[in-house]
Image (cartoon, helix red, strand yellow):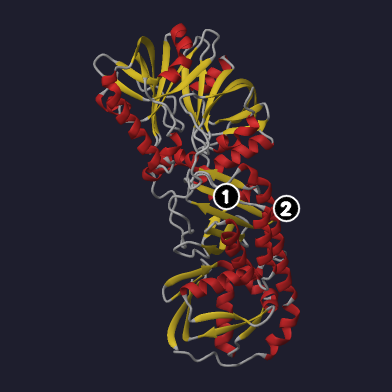
Amino acid sequence: MIDAELAAFVEGGQSIHVSTCDAHGRPHGVRGVAARADAIAGHVDVYIADIAYGRLRPALESSRQAAMVFCRPTDDRACQLKGAVVSVRPADPSERTMAREQWDGFMAALDGIGISPRMADRWPWWPAHVVRVQVTAIFEQTPGPKAGAQLS
Amino acid sequence: MSVTLDSLGTCLQGLWPAMLYTCSRDGVPNAAYLSQVEYVDPTHVALSFQFFNKSRRNITENPHALVSVIDPDTGQGWCLRLHYQHSETSGPLFDRMAWRIEAIASYCGLKGVFKLRAADVYEVLEIEASPEEQGGALETPTRELVAPEVFTARALQDLCGRIQSADSLDVLVDSILEGIEASFGFRQSMILVPTEESDRLVTIATRGYDVSGVGSEVPVGVGIAGVVAEARKPIRISGLMRGMLYALASKRAADNPDAYPPPRIPLPGLQNPDSQLGVPLLVRDELVGVLCLESTAPYRFHESDKASIELLGSYLALAIQNMQWQERQGDAAGDAAGATADARPASAGTRKRCEVTYYESDECVFVDGEYLIRSLPARILWRLLREHSTTGRIEFTNRELRLDRTLKLPDYKDNLESRLLLLRRRLEQKAPQIRLAPRGRGRFALELDCTVTMSSAP
């Protein structure tokens, strides 16, 4: 389901949003920091700053479902991956460099479209939690008539 | 709620795309980008519904939604917890949102593709700050995103002062654009006026571009100027919202490169404008013209400037219309001058040769093989040159042109003065050896620094 191209895209320093649903049917969503995709196992690890994860946690624990949108700011190419939450853990310090590189890539992309990365200077990105999502569906999310079409 | 919706106006500009979170009835989450979040009143917003997608299906099953927006001035993210109320498919709210989408789509060559199906109105139940998108007042005032308020009373006063001293339409339109740069700081601007065809605008003055672009035409309903003319409302576009559509526009252009043939005179414009503002110049519902401003700053026009922009448009429209009337008043005085100023030789100069060709079917004039102008200004130039070649006359009056049925001026509101201005400016750019020199109100002289060879083609 996750091919090499999609894995590279997911790990390419994109704008990431993670959402879930609480027991009352209300949506919750936060910004993600980085992601790692395992094409063979079919799962994605999404890194969420602790300060944001705290807000998502109650709903995530109750529904165990997540949707992740990855968008490249420079051309608005985007996709959405949905699936079941299989594990949550605090990010390891050894993962900090990888997360930082992706976060910096996102900041550079903002700069490329005329938004000063300084605007996001204060956005906390570390420490983080890692939410592993077993992907069950992938959708086109690039704005336009085909947004929402299932890719696999 | 501790933070009010009224205080989040800047977040709804579209500089950062908003994110809409929804859930299906059985609790499957969905996230999607949203092109517009529109302020309705202190407790309601409207979201653009353009495509039948998962978000839309979810909302019909489950009215709970969450929208995240970012304040472009501070970087602070905000989450708006919403409850769907109803959808509007007509009325002022729908029109406001639809025209903005239309302007952006048209700008990208996608007119008609990005239609607003409905303005979905939601009650705002709660607003909370996103802790992972912490903002704050940025210390340095040099940051580009924090644009100062533009249309201040002082700046408007300065502009009015400049306009009042203009004594012709020619000077007036240039004064307006100069004043807009001096008073408001907008270096790129243009004024377009309706042509005698009801579905087109033509550029009569520009400022701040590498190429003047005077004479370039825009169909009504196309591009920001064309959509402003169609909607007769100011339209403001900021940053990313247009960018989102641009990607698709590029794709479509690649698929069908012949869909939008290049115009004869390209409309001037910044290569990557991040903010655009189009203002209709209206007098009692009559469209006198359209003023367009551009900036490379991503977020240049403030919500609070809206009233001033409308006021400015009305004032400029009155000033232009008043000047057109004044110039028309000079027609009578021009009569006598036109009758006596005959058979004088054109000014000598270097007397190079110059070939002027009139293409009858297209009603356009080429000078030395290069396109000059079309339609009414072309017919006027051809008429003046023919008259000069047969009688030697060099002085003409607006009135005689107005009475000449062969020129096919509209009977009502012919806008002859702006057509002459357009012709004069195109000649200055493309054929400076042929000039239309003002000789007082309602009169002008044809000055030739060349020997004109005339030919016409079907």
Asked if A12 appears above or below B282 in the picture, the reply is above
> Of A111 and B97, which appears nearest the observer?
A111
Q: Which dot, 1 or 2, sits closer to the camera?
A: 1
| Residue for point 44% across, 63% down | B210
The answer to which quarter of the image holds residue A135 is: top left
Chain label for disc 1: B
| Residue for point 25% across, 25% down | A4
Image location of residue A134, percent across then percent down: 33, 13
Image location of residue B245, percent across then percent down: 46, 39
Which residue is tagged 2? B285
Image location of residue B370, percent across then percent down: 43, 71
Type of the residue with mark 1: Leu
| SS of the residue under disc 1 | strand
Dot 2, how many residues are within 10 Å of its Cα: few (below 14), some (14-19), or many (20+)? few
> Of A109 and A99, which appears nearest the observer?
A99
Asked if B292 appears above or below B140 in the picture, the reply is below
Type of the residue with mark 2: Asp
Which residue is tagged 1? B277
In this rendering, the count of numbered labels is 2
| SS of the residue under disc 2 | loop
Dot 1, how many residues are within 10 Å of its Cα: few (below 14), some (14-19), or many (20+)? many
Asked if B214 appears above or below A57 in the picture, the reply is below
Quadrant in the picture for the N terminus of chain B: top right
How far apart marks 1 and 2 lie (CA) works out to 20 Å
Q: Is residue B400 left or right of residue A78?
A: right
N-terminal-most mark, 1 or 2: 1
